[in-house]
Image (cartoon, helix red, strand yellow):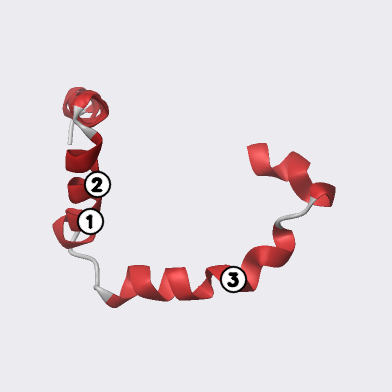
Amino acid sequence: MTRFSLRRLEKDFAAAPSEKQRLFLMRLPQLLDLSPTGPALLRTSEPSFEFWNNSDDAAYDTL
């Protein structure tokens, strides 16, 4: 993908209504040919990392 087409995609995505953005994001794993279980496994593992949500390491959140 060229830089131009990536910028165009970003611009079109930002300009799209929120409902169309949601639909696109729902289809994105299929478009990228990702396993359907991949995103589900990531969501399942998220609570395991909650201990990092604290004020002590808030400085690292911006990196």
Which residue corresponds to mark 3?
Answer: 47
Measured in 3D between alpha carbons, the distance from the residue under mark 1 to the one under mark 3, in whole angstroms, is 21 Å
Residue 22 badge? 2
Residue 26 badge? 1
Q: Quadrant of residue 60?
A: top right
> Mark 2 and 3 residues: CB-CB less than 8 Å, in contact?
no
- The answer to whether residue 63 is visible is no
Q: Residues within 10 Å of mark 3 (few under 14, many from 20)?
A: few
Q: Position of residue 15 (x, y in %)?
A: 22, 24
Say if 21 sits above or below 2 in the image: below
Query: In the visual, does 61 lie left or right of 22?
Result: right
Q: Amino acid at mark 1?
A: Met
Q: Amino acid at mark 2?
A: Arg
Which image quarter holds the C terminus? top right
Query: In the visual, does 30 lie left or right of 58?
Result: left
Under circle 3, the secondary element is helix
Say if 5 sits above or below 18 in the image: above
